[in-house]
Image (cartoon, rainbow, N blue to C red):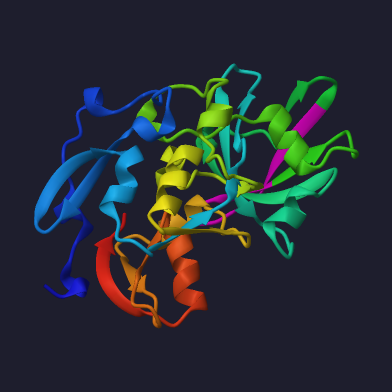
Amino acid sequence: MLPQKILIKEFNYHLPEERIAIHPLPERDKSKLLVYKSGKIEEHIYNRLADCLPAESLLVFNNTKVMAVRLLFTKHTGSIIELFCLEPAGDYPDVTTAMLQKGRVLWKCLVGGAKKWKEETLTCSKENIALTVKKAKQEKDYFVIEFTWNDTILSFADVLQLFGTIPLPPYLNRAAEQEDEERYQTIYARYNGSVAAPTAGLHFTNSLFNKLEAKSIRTYIAEDSAHYAKLFIIELRNKIEVLKKHPETGKPIYADKYNNLRQLLHKSSVSFIILRIIQ
């Protein structure tokens, strides 16, 4: 079948709630790993990943760090307005620069309860810091929100840390807890900027990295991190994803998230070998 004729809806399936891991296992690399090889589907454990990959493969990781981008504001009526920060909306050269803005910043956001938000501004306070939000512009898939706060010593990253919570995937159907601040980050997370974790990377541990090294499987953590915003996901509906081989060695290259793959496609000349549907 031609890729252009493949429809996402053909891959829909029922996922019972009791099969969803609401909380992570105590040990990251003890999670289950589904392996498809030679026409067979097998169930493994993540700490056996090295046994599933050929020697001299290259694993590419993203050291992006998930921000506390979910913010709740209470109206005078008691209704809750939820803001989900996606990415900078102003004329900033990169996410880091936008995160370091002080006093005021523009951000693209999803707004939960937008129809109930009639007031010009909403404000919440914590530790003598007042954070005020205002709808600056409405686009098709998001709002541009103006954030202002009364302590100009604090950066926007500081403000998110103070007022925000970790944006857990909605299918978990629970509020973020203290353990999520650590467990919804990879152990190699370094740079703030994402609204979602590179999910496969959550299961990697130092022990697993040692096993990969022992089998001569190389790992590369990209310092020029690609951050994940929901807008990027929205734009990629019904698109095709590709995996690649190194042009010189012919060894497989694996990426732990789509954006890593996107960087590989953009920065290197390699041949396409696998097609994978994304939602």
Majority SS type along the magenta span: strand
Q: Is residue 143 above or below residue 28?
A: below
Which quadrant does the N terminus fall into? bottom left
Residues drawn in magenta: 130-145
Report the number of numbered marks.
Answer: 0
Residue 123, picture quadrant: top right
Residue 123 inside the magenta-drawn segment: no
Q: Which quadrant of the figure has residue 239?
A: bottom left
The image shows residue 101 at horizontal and vertical percentages of 81, 49
Left of 232 or right of it: where is 8? left
Residue 98 x, y percent position in the rendering: 74, 53
Extreme-front residue of the structure: 214
Q: State the image coordinates of residue 70 (x, y, percent, origin top left).
A: 58, 34
Vertical arrangement, residue 123 with respect to residue 265, above or below: above
Q: Residue at x 74, y 62 (%)?
A: 92
In reply to whether residue 138 is colored magenta, the answer given is yes
Locate the C terminus and report the quarter of the image it occupies. Answer: bottom left
Against 235, residue 267 (above or below) is below
Quarter of the image holding residue 54? bottom left
Question: What is the x, y in percent for residue 230?
Answer: 48, 51
Query: What residue is shown at x 31% (from left), y 57% (from top)?
Result: 278
In front of the other: 90 or 210:
210
Q: Nearer the viewer, residue 182 or 57?
A: 57
Q: Is residue 163 visible?
A: yes
Left or right position of 273 against 236: left
Viewer-closest of 75 and 43 = 43
Would residue 12 appear left or right of 228 to someone viewing this image?
left
The residue shown at (22%, 57%) is 8
Does residue 122 appear in the picture of this structure?
Answer: no
